[in-house]
Image (cartoon, rainbow, N blue to C red):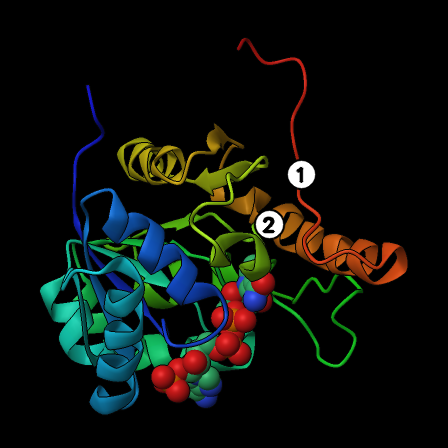
Amino acid sequence: MPNPRYTLAILGGTGNEGPGLALRWAQIGHKVIIGSRQAEKGERVAAEINARLGAEWVTGMTNEDAARACEVAVLTVPYAAQNPLLENLKDLLQGKVLINVTVAMQPPKVARAYIPPEGSACEQAQALLGPDVRVVAAFQNVGAHNLEDPEHPLDCDVLICGDNKEAKGIAIGLAEDLGTRGIDAGPLVNAKVIEGLTSVLIGINIRYKIPGAGIRITGLPA
Ligand SMILES: NC(=O)c1ccc[n+]([C@@H]2O[C@H](COP(=O)([O-])OP(=O)(O)OC[C@H]3O[C@@H](n4cnc5c(N)ncnc54)[C@H](OP(=O)(O)O)[C@@H]3O)[C@@H](O)[C@H]2O)c1
């Protein structure tokens, strides 16, 4: 049976990571909204994705309108932007699932794992939004380069952390919809490891001169 289809808002979806996720999820039947600080920028990026899809499946709007309209929100903004943006959207996200792709980092040292005093960007998001927003950490280890070409199959796994089983199940389904395995990696407190792995992968990309290192878990049943 196919996974459920959702209205997804990709908040900050106009950058590197958002459009690839949007294109792949729209292609398999999710209704995708690109959120931006400027409605026109969200509309422009949505139009670019639709041109690639050859269909009008993606819309663009402000982050506020996208958060209001969605069933499931996906956050793809730089770490420094996360908390101010979530403060603005807090009321609109109550009762919803927030899948957070954001990674705690201290530019320019992006290849060094950074653990903030609060543990991780995802734990900060959960604390800020309160218990009625179910925050899930996912897709932090899937590089934008790997998402760009929808004909290119993803051969990595997606580690998923969160404190709500149903919300984690939604993220696992969305990972499967990308053609990957979504793996339950435990409670949200483990997000610091997932986020830290992103810096490890960036360092591997630099040292081995490759565009998109990923991770894969062995030992699981096929
Ligand atoms: N790029 C990757 O390969 C990758 C892989 C895994 C995880 N991640 C993580 O995913 C997140 C997004 O990465 P990205 O490369 O897509 O980032 P990005 O391209 O630098 O930024 C994404 C979007 O965030 C919005 N934004 C920027 N500054 C903002 C601010 N001060 N307030 C509100 N919104 C702001 C912008 O959208 P508008 O101007 O339209 O508002 C921008 O297009 C980061 O936390 C990153 O660590 C990235």
Numbered circles on residues, count = 2
**CB under 8 Å between callouts 2 and 1?**
yes
Q: Position of residue 133 (x, y in %)?
A: 26, 55
Q: Examine the image and state in which quarter residue 70 appears.
A: bottom left
Callout 2: CB less than 8 Å from ligand 1: yes
Residue lying at the far right in this picture: please name it.
207
Q: Please determine whether, in this image, residue 219 is positioned above or below residue 22.
A: above
Q: Please determine whether, in this image, residue 159 is positioned above or below residue 126.
A: above
* 165 relative position to 43: left or right: right
* 174 relative position to 211: left or right: left
The mark found on residue 141 in the picture is 2
Of 165 and 197, the residue lying toward us: 197
Q: Position of residue 176 (x, y in %)?
A: 38, 32
Q: Please determine whether, in this image, residue 38 is positioned above or below residue 118.
A: below
Q: Position of residue 89 (x, y in %)?
A: 25, 75
Of 52 and 81, the residue lying toward us: 52
Residue lying at the far top in this picture: please name it.
221
Rate crowding at label 1 as few (under 14), some (14 to 19) or many (20 or more) other CA atoms within 10 Å. Answer: some
Query: Three-letter amino acid code at disc 1?
Result: Ile
Query: Three-letter amino acid code at disc 2?
Result: Asn
Report helix, strand or loop for mark 2.
loop
Report helix, strand or loop for mark 1.
loop
Badge 2 or badge 1: first in the primary sequence: 2
Tell me what residue is drawn at x 26 percent, y 48 percent. Answer: 27
* 35 relative position to 91: left or right: right
Q: Circle 1 sits on which residue?
A: 215
